[in-house]
């Protein structure tokens, strides 16, 4: 919420400065852009590791859930289970017949 307010204030200041069209206004804009850039850089160094840790924990928990689901349905030794039946594609009879060829040197 605070970031949205800061961005709105920043954009309002830029709009006002662009209306002035002076050299000091130009330098103020450059200063604000540089400050915003460095502030974003500092905040990203602080919050990026926290965000990445939470994303990694979520991925690990999803992976762990998948492993536990697979372990819950153990097969007896020598028993075969088929998860998905292959699609039977019928051969097209209109294509023609297969011709065996030999390479000629």
Image (cartoon, rainbow, N blue to C red):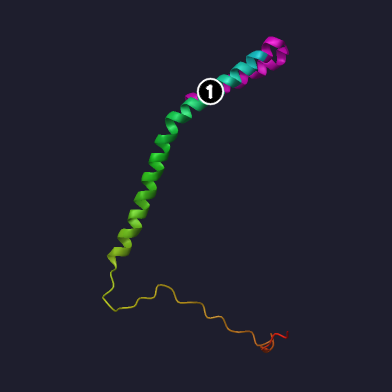
Per the image, label 1 sits on a secondary structure element best described as helix
Examine the rendered structure and indicate whether residue 87 appears above or below residue 104: above
The image quadrant of residue 57 is top left
Residue 87 among those drawn in magenta: no
- Left or right of 56 in this view: 24: right
Examine the rendered structure and indicate whether residue 75 appears above or below residue 51: below
Q: What's the residue at 29%, 79% (across, down)?
A: 78
Instruction: Name the outermost residue toward the front.
Output: 105
- Left or right of 84 in this view: 98: right
Image quadrant holding the C terminus, namely bottom right
- Left or right of 101 in this view: 36: left
Q: What's the residue at 68%, 15% (across, down)?
A: 26
Q: How many marks?
A: 1
Q: What's the residue at 30%, 78% (across, down)?
A: 79
Any part of residue 1 in sight: no
Residue 8 among those drawn in magenta: yes
The spot of residue 12 in percent (x, y) is 62, 19
Stretch of the chain drawn in magenta: 1-26
Report crowding for label 1: few under 14, some 14 to 19, many 20 or more residues within 10 A (C-alpha).
few
Q: Main secondary structure of the magenta part?
A: helix
| Residue ID for mark 1 | 38
């Amino acid at each position: 919420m605070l970031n949205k307010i800061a961005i709105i204030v920043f954009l309002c200041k830029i709009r006002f400065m662009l209306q002035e069209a002076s050299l000091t206004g130009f330098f103020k804009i450059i200063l604000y852009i540089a400050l915003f850039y460095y502030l974003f850089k500092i905040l990203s160094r602080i919050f990026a590791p926290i965000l990445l840790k939470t994303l990694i924990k979520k991925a690990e928990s999803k992976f762990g859930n998948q492993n536990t689901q697979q372990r819950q349905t153990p097969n007896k030794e020598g028993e075969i289970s088929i998860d998905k039946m292959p699609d039977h594609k019928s051969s097209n009879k209109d294509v023609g017949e297969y011709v065996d060829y030999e390479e000629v040197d």
